[in-house]
Amino acid sequence: MKCSICGAKLKKEGDICINCYKEFQEEEDLKKDNEERLKIKRKYSISYEFFKYIEVIVICILSIVICISSGGILEALGVIVICALVMGFLLFIDKRIAMGTKATFYNKKAVYKFKLAFIDTTKVVKYTDISDIRYFQTNRQKKYGYGDLCIYTKGKIPGSGFLNGFQIKNVENVEEVFGKIGEILGVQAEE
Ligand SMILES: [Zn+2]
């Protein structure tokens, strides 16, 4: 008799071996794990967006002032239109990314979803596969309490640990969220 999944030899009669059964059992447990503990989203705020793109805005305003002061009203209007289009595009993209990004933490797993235009990704990360959690903040993010949250998994290939994990940028109250994730994972470790 052979295991119908991995082909390992079976001592007793049966469809699958102990290892495959364990894996199957674990998968079933993960599927049943539906209690939402924490939801994380990428924050979109207009004031932060303007703060983030402050250099672009300053350059736009300077260009407009230079055009007007040199008597080029039409050029000034042109610059205004271009600046408005560029800013509008940047804001639109950031808003879309924020709307399409979320992670939900359950008792044993985290589910990460990213949706943008034709991209539609879902990642399920078991807590037992997580090797590290970190968050990073730029000075601008710090002022808003935002941060980029990174979930790293154990990877057999160097560098693959992050690819199997996920990152959510501009998480609001990142320090607090980071603490909550630690609590959820900590409880898991004690079990
Ligand atoms: Zn097997």
Image (cartoon, rainbow, N blue to C red):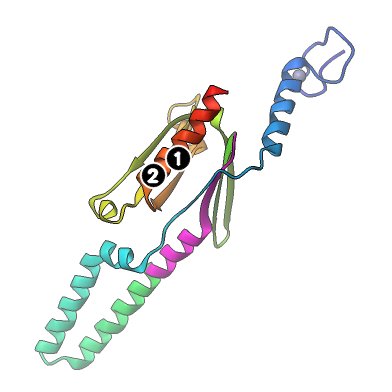
Give the structural element (helix, strand or loop) at label 1. Answer: helix
- The image position of residue 188, as x and y in percent, is 55, 28
- SS for callout 2: helix
* Relative to 118, 80 lies left or right: left
Q: Nearer the viewer, residue 61 or 159?
A: 61
Question: Taking 171 as reference, is 24 above or below it?
Answer: above
Please give the label number shown on residue 50.
none
| Amino acid on which the number 2 mark rests in the picture | Glu
- Residue 69 in view (yes/no): yes
Residue 119 in the figure: left or right of residue 59: right
Residue type at numbered disc 1: Lys
Asked if residue 40 lies left or right of residue 32, the reply is left
Image mark for residue 180: 1
Please say whether residue 145 is one of the residues in the magenta stretch: no
Residue at (43% x, 69% y) in the render: 92
Q: Position of residue 153 (x, y in %)?
A: 49, 31
Label of residue 176 in the image: 2
| Segment colored magenta | 91-107
> Circles 2 and 1: CB distance less than 8 Å?
yes
- Foreground of the two, 12 or 183: 183
Tell me which corner region of the image, top left, top right, bottom left or bottom right, holds residue 1: top right
Query: Residue at the spot x=77%, y=14% of the render?
Result: 8
Residue 6 visible (yes or no): no
Quarter-wise, where is residue 111 in the image? top right
Q: Position of residue 170 (x, y in %)?
A: 38, 53
Based on the picture, tell me whether residue 103 belongs to the magenta stretch: yes
Disc 2 CB within 8 Å of nearest ligand 1 atom: no
Q: Is residue 171 found left or right of 28 in the rendered image?
A: left
Q: Residue at x 12, y 82 (%)?
A: 66
